[in-house]
Every structure is written in C-alpha cells, then in structure tokens.
Amino acid sequence: MFSSKLGIIFSVSLYILLFYSIFDIYYTSPLTHGLSYDRPSVPGLVNNVVFIVADGLRYDKLFTEKMEHTPTLRSIVMDRGSWGFSHTRVPTESRPGHVALFAGFYEDVASVTKGWQANAVEFDSVFNRSNQVFAWGGPDVVPMFQPPDRVGDARVRIESYPHSMLDFTAENITQVDDWVVDRFSEFMTAESDLLLKTDSSGSAADGFRRGNLVFLHLSAADQMGHTQKPGSEEYTRMIQNIDANIARVLKLFEGNKQLAQETAFIFTADHGMTEWGSHGAGSLHETVTPLIVWGKHIPTPSSVADLSRASGADGLLPFNYGLKHYNVRQADLCPLIAALLGTPIPANSVGELPLDLLDVDSSLKVALIRENAQHILKQLHIKYEEQKACHYRVFFREFSKLTQNQITAMLATATSQTRNQDYSAAIETYRSIIRLSLEGLNYYHKYDRFFMGFCIVASYAVWSLMLYADMVSRHGARPSQQNGLTKSTWTSSPSTLLVFLALCFTGVLIIRSVYHRSLLRTFYQLLPLILSTILLTNSRFRLVLSRSSGHFFSAESTNEKRTGPRLGMLLLLLTVLMEFALWGFIRRPLLSFGALLLGAWPYIDVSFIVLSNRQTLQRLWLAACLVLAVFPTLPVVGSFSSPTLVLISSVCVSAASYVFLQKRCESKPPHFWSTEPHFILVVGALVSGVLVFLVRCLVALSAPIPLLIHVISWILLVASPAVAMVSADLTVSRKLVSLTLAFFIPFNLMNVFYEGAFFFVLTTVAFMWSWFESGLEFHEFFGLRLASDASALPPVTGEHTCIDRANLRQPFFYVFLVIYSFFGTGNIASINT
C-alpha cells in the first residue's frame, strides 16, 4: 500500500501535517487582541521616568557584600531608594527581557521561528503610551520599540550606536556604554527643557499619552560576560564603569533641580548570565536580575530586624545590608512605569503593579491596583468570549476559580471595602482578582491543548498500526498467504471510504462555519477517525490485525514455549526505557539509568547478540554503555570549559577512525591513505581540535585571533560534509566513518568541554548496535557494499505474521539514543547550549 505513488504521497503529507500540528497546537500566541483604552483615573505621579538597563548584568556581581566597586549605586541603596530582585522567564535573552520590561508580557512563543531579535509580532509598549520617548542603546534592542504609528513623530527619538561597535573582541568593550551616556549628556545639555513637557493634547486620538520616558540601554555587561566571563577582573572593571556612568547621569539631573524633583529612576537588567558567559536557560544566575529604584514617590530604605528572614530565605544572597528588599516579576515593572507616568497599561501586559515600590497613600494605591485589575479582566473576558464562541456550549467549561459571577462578586466586595476605607483589604481583593485572572488567561490559552494533543497521539497510534499491518502483510506473511494479501488495494470497499471521507469533509465545513473553528484544528479532531476508517476498510490490514490480536507474541513465531511471557517482559522493559528517556527531559541523571538498562540488554534478551565470542561482546557492550551513562551525571556544558579535553577528544576520534579503517583495509597498499577522502576527514577531525585549543588559549591571553585560523575553520565547516558525500567507496565501514567525521568536525569546532568525548562514546555505542542488529560477523558487516551486498544480510523467512524481538526493540533503542544525544551534554532549554 505505502510503496505505491499514492501511498507515498499520502504518507509524506500525513507526516508533514502531524509535524506542523506541534507548532499549531503548542506554539500559539498568548496575546489578546481587541482591547480598548480608558483614560486613567489616576494622574501621573512623576513627569519623567529614567529607565536604565544593564544588559546581561549578574545580580551577585553587583550586590556584593560591601558593593565596594559601585559607590554610586551603594549610596542609592543605602540612603535614597529601594533595592531587590527582578525575576525573568526562559528564554533569558535580550529581546524577551526588554519586551517584558516595556510591554509587560513574556515572549510570544508564536514568534520562535523568527528569532528573538526581529519584531516577530507587533506589540504595544510604554514607548507608545508616553508623551515623549528618548532612547539610546544597542542596534539589536532599541529600534524594536519604535511605535509603528509614531514613525516621524518628533516626540519619539530613538538612536542606536553603529553595528561596528558590537565587536566582542574589541579592546574597549565599555565604549558602548560610554557612547549611550555621551549622547544622553549632549541631549541634556542642549534640550533638557523637552523633559518639562509632560502632556500631549489630551485627546483620545492621542492615546492618553503622558509623561516622558528616557531609556538608556547599556550593553557592555553582556558583551564582557560573553568574552571575559562574569568572574574576570575585566567584568569587575566594567561594573565600575557602569557605576561611573550612572553617576554621570545623576549629575546631569542634579544640575536641574526642577527635573530632579519630578523624576523617578529604575535600574535593572534584562537577564543574567552563567559563570561560563552564556544565557538563555533557567538557572538562577540567568533568571534573577538586580533591581534598584529611587526618586520621586519611591520609598526610601527601611531597616529590617530579622536578617535571616529578610535575606537568605529566597536563596539569593547571604546578606541584605540590614535593609528591606523586594522581589518582583520582570513584567511587573511595565505597570510600574505606567503608574508613575499616569498612562494606560500597555495592551498585552500581564504584570501586577508592585505597590510596595510606590510611596503614596493607601487610597491612591487602591485606585492604581484597581486599574491594573480591570486591565487584566478585560483580557480575560476577551479570551473567555473567544473560547466560548468556538466550542460547543454544552461541553464548554468556564474557568472554575473565577467565573463571571465570581468576578462580579469580587469587584463588588473590593468596591465596598474601598468605600469603607478598608484599603488594605481592598488591595488584597484586587490582587486576588489579578492573580486569578492570570491563571484564567493561561487556562483559556491552553483550553483545548490536551484534547488536541490526544487527537494527534491517537492519529500517530492508528498510523503506527497501519504501518505495522502493511509491513507484516508485505514482508511477514507465509507464501501461502501472499496471494490473498496482495490482491487488496487501498480498501476492499473504496466507495464506502469515499462516502465517509465526503461526510467528514462536510462535517468539517459545518463545524468550522458554525463555531468559527480553525480548519486545521477541526481536521485534527477528525484525523483519527479518518485513519481508522482506512485501516478497517482494508482487508489486508483487517486480516493482519485479527491474527495479531489472537496470537500476538504467540509461540507460533518461535520454538520456545515461553516466548509470549518473555516478549511481554521485554515490552515492559522497553516501556521503562522510554520512561527514563521522557523523565530525562526534566532530570538528566535518569538518562543514565536508561543507558545502564541498555548495557544489561544482552543478558536479558539472548537474541540481541547472536555472534561468535558472544560473552566478550556482551562485556564490551556493557562497558561502552557504562561509560555512556556517566555523561548525564556531569555538569551541564556551559558551566566550565577545557580546551585540553577538546583536543584530547579530537585525538581519540581521529586515532579510532584511523585504526578502524586500517583494520578494514589490510589488503590495500600503505600509501592508499594519501589519495582517500577518508584521510582528509581524519586529519580534519584532529585539526578541528587543535583550532579550538589555539582559539581558547588566545582568548585567555586577550590576543587577537589570526585570520588563518578563521579561514581554516570555515573551510573545515563547509568542506567536511562535501568530502563525506563524494566518497566513492560505499562499504559500510568507510561510509559510516565518513558520515561520523562529517558530523564531528563542525560539532567539534563549537565544543568547549566534554562534548567531543560524549560524541565518541555515543557513536561507538551506535556502531556496535548496528553491527549486533545485522547478525553478521565483524568483517562481514563492515565489509558490505551498500549498493550491491544486500543479499548478504540474513534472509527474511516470513514464517509469521507477528513482529519479533528485533522489530520490537529497534525503534525503542533508536528513539532513546536520539533523546540521549540531545541531553547527554546539557539541556536544550537554552538557545546557546
């Protein structure tokens, strides 16, 4: 069936559809559209907000015990403002972090295919809500906040330094921060009076824009962390430079007391950084950033008596300077800016206003948190109506923790508490509304995700049954059965199938038109039914399934009486293996238990190794799997580096490849290596390790990298796959080694620690597995020519219509090793890993 042209087209189309369904179901935008603005009922608290972001700054490098490197920020923390921590979300990258700060929502996962730097989706931000915006910073961050409806507006001034200054190898990386503060200094000298203009015309058409926002993006911390690492002396000097630049900014305001008295300052970072200088994942060093706020309507420092509870309880710092500190979510800073300036909260903001960072009376806090709650409730109502409109009302389930009646009751309670001047209770009620509304937004966003996922899983399951039935009917039937099984085409009753498919298509159109459902999502729901119809209307498939259900794993396929129980036990162990693989996504060390189970497999399943010297091969396989099991227990790559280990791994891979090919080419003359492409790849693998070693040493010495190293690296990167593909010798041994080295060389050029050693052990296990599954001796299997020696493989006897042990374990082993290859050296939560 599936070997015909129509079957191949059907199979490929189905795989494309199922693959796309992953993105269509799970990578959906959480943004709510169609919100209307109301004029804020609370006037602006300040005229200006100066927002300073030190891109990639580590909180523990700034908040040292004495803050001896940052006297300006220390004086602010001790005498003038409030300090604490801002908690980000994965991915900890520049674009998502800044979007959370100024737009109030976390990265829209629907933009994952467009990268973090591009404006993948249009979004509202405080840049669009403010009367005037003045921003200076990096070309990869500042321009993305240009409001699309304010292009050419003289009140929006956005400038970025040239791309040429984004040089991670520059001797003076702090020049980018100096450039930003220099431009701001020039602005304050020539045009500081612009900051005295705080309100627009006030018309609804102008979006209720108020106040002025100044954004200073300091990116030296990110560049210095990537190159010199956060623990270096250079990083410390960079922090001193940040402190000096903030002192320059403050001096500019101190020269104009009118501006200084009407300005609030916020200093934070968009993300942190690991000790190795990477970011993107979810460690505390990446997700926790410093936060310092000061100025008008910002509380001054308050002493705390219980030091152990004030610090250390959150596991961040062992000291707190004897002062109260605050923990906020990164998105909470967006409504804080809106509250300070008196502007509407940006449309898609999910931040909760941190009232503790505002020094205003309680009645004003109630008014501010009420607007915050009403904004979140608007988003919740839109999501509720969207889901209700496209689902059967009989089956639709409202968010039980916050129904429409409960919302009305809670708002009435908060209004009553405010009227009775019970402000603290009213604030808590509004906070409960906000938090429950955020849960509701997540509930409606993922409303049918489980059901859609179930439909896709069911489609995969039915499709697997179809493949199994097709494989057995074509390759596993006895000769006496072949005639009866091959006469069938797609179905024994094609008219019945066509009628059914027509009815399904009609149903899709009706459901989509009545309930405004997505055409694809409706099709996902019907796909298991369509595949089941194809499966059950095919006589060949029905015959295979009926026989398999009667004696699946029966003794008919073997001479052993206890084959059924033994195969049942193998299936159970394979399920355990998959559980280790799945839980390995969360806990890497569990993959080691899976590798140990692989190592013990020859002792459990006697059909796994059927070669001579079986006991020796069992021990070699167990030893290889034991070594493989070590890697998930090691630290995630990125925390440490060892160019020496990279070089040693390259030597091992090159030497093993040479010895392996030499053993397979004993009949060849000694000089044949000089003309074989395999020799180029073996040497290239060694050279790649040498290049990595040299580059790391040069970076450690702060020396420039010669152009020749760049040229050789690019040649290896491009040429290695090409050399492997043009290899004329199609023996299994040489083809496997060529492809392995073609993958290893580009991989090795990006290695920093033990990745090369992991690659070597993993490919060794994969080579052995391929050899054992073939059932051939070493020289027979690796001496096969891929194009012509298929007849050398053990013939398929076709004495049963059930799968055997090899059919059962091979897909499980394959999937496990694929997952192991991802997580053996780290995690894929980080873009950089």
Image (cartoon, helix red, strand yellow):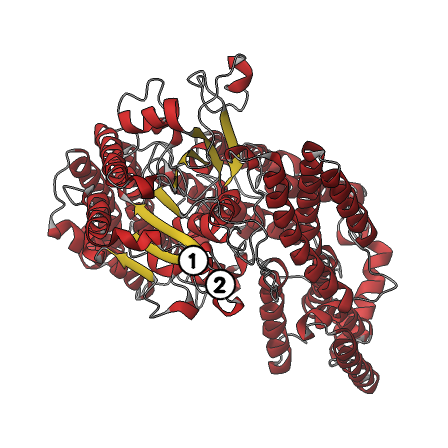
434 left or right, relative to 89: right
**Residue under pointer 2:** 202
Return the x and y of residue 797 as percentages of the image width and height: 67, 61
Return the x and y of residue 580 as percentages of the image width and height: 62, 38
Whether label 1 touches label 2, CB < 8 Å: yes
Residue at 68% x, 53% y: name it.
377
Q: Toward the viewer: 581 or 43?
A: 43
Report the amino acid beneath label 1: Asp
Return the x and y of residue 7 as percentages of the image width and height: 64, 77
Vertical placement of residue 212 versus 264, above or below: below
**Residue under pointer 1:** 199
Q: CA distance from mark 1 to mark 2?
A: 7 Å
Vertical placement of residue 744 versus 562, above or below: below
Confirm whether residue 560 shows in the render.
Answer: no
Return the x and y of residue 508 as percentages of the image width and height: 76, 78
Residue at 76% x, 61% y: name it.
801
Report the amino acid beneath label 2: Gly
Vertical placement of residue 606 versus 10, above or below: above
Name the element at disc 2.
Answer: loop
Label 1 crowd (10 A; few <14 / some 14-19 / many >=20): some
Q: Toward the viewer: 140 or 754?
A: 140
Q: Toward the viewer: 639 or 464?
A: 639
Label 2 crowd (10 A; few <14 / some 14-19 / many >=20): few
**Residue found at the very far front of the displayed protein:** 258
Report the number of discs. Answer: 2
